Image (tube, rainbow, N blue to C red):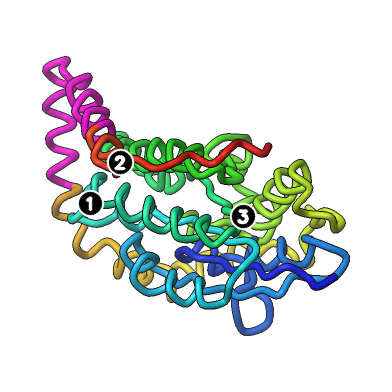
Amino acid sequence: MRSPRFVALGDSLTEGVGDRVGGGWRGWAALLAESLGPEPARFTNLAVSGAQTRDVLEGQLPAALALRPDLVSVVVGVNDTLRRTFDIRAVAARLDQVYAACTGQGAVLLTACLPDPGAVLGLPGALARPLARRQRAVNTVVHALSDRYGAVHLHACEGDWITDRAMWSADRLHPGEPGHRQLALRFHALLAARGVATGPAPSPEPESPAPTPTASLWWLATAGTGWVARRCTDLLPQLLSLAADEMRHRARGTSIRLDLRAGAAVSAALAALSPGEQRPDTA
């Protein structure tokens, strides 16, 4: 029996940033690929740091479909929330197309909702709340579409791992090796419950020692600061505007309006999608 073909789509989380092995990144998807069966899966990682839903739809998806995968992971959306061009309706439409194309070929689809970056980074409330609202919107869309297409869906926005500092890398935005292992382990459990994963579960124990505080500070002072700056260049002016709007509403006691507005935008985004036949739940 041949080993399954597993293709991973997404951004830096799936690329493996935070879990360095040798001169490159490994990450949760590569760890999962080793545990899908008696032999490691035939694994291709198409994820690219900084990718948004548009990049997955237009660049990564065609390459993935050409490989005729048995299993496809699509974990993306955080970078969309970090851009001034954020549009939940466009995000929903792109994810719908990606999910439909993958499952249309008969592949098992893996998805995940994610914690909001503001909370993970420990931003002040006025800056964190707008990002949290955006990430909740993306997660709501991912929940709905995962159900629609019968995906194996991981609630990665929940659990103690989010607040456990040991799970995160020096940049505080990506999991470290323990965090990547936790994601692989949780995905494996879901796949095993469906009979898709038949190999032994990934080990939760890291192979490499955690970076020292000195090493973490050195990373932040060199590569880390530039990495964050490159991704926030177009967001920062708008984020400051969003924060000012947040503070005005809180001062007036009308913050609920922002939540209602975001909820209405999500409902409109889902309602705008073309009707599709929902795949049966095989869980």
**Residue range corresponding to the magenta coloring:** 240-267
- The type of residue carrying mark 3 is Val
- The type of residue carrying mark 2 is Arg
Q: Nearer the viewer, mark 3 or mark 1?
A: 3
Find numbered disc 3 in the image and state the secondary structure of the residue it sits on: strand
Q: CA distance from mark 3 to mark 1?
A: 28 Å
For image coordinates 31% across by 35% down, the residue present is 133
Q: Is residue 168 above or below residue 257?
A: below
- Name the dominant secondary structure of the magenta segment: helix
Q: Is residue 266 left or right of residue 216?
A: left
For image coordinates 18% across by 32% down, the residue present is 246
Farthest-out residue, front: 277
Q: CA distance from mark 2 to mark 3?
A: 27 Å
Q: Is label 1 in contact with label 2 (beta carbons under 8 Å)?
A: yes
State the image coordinates of residue 126 (x, y, percent, origin top left): 25, 35
Quarter of the view holding residue 233? bottom left
- Mark 2 — residue? 134
- Mark 3 — residue? 108
State the image coordinates of residue 230 (x, y, percent, origin top left): 30, 70
For image coordinates 68% across by 49% down, the residue present is 187
Q: Nearer the viewer, mark 2 or mark 3?
A: 3
State the image coordinates of residue 1 (x, y, percent, origin top left): 85, 70
- Mark 1 — residue? 86
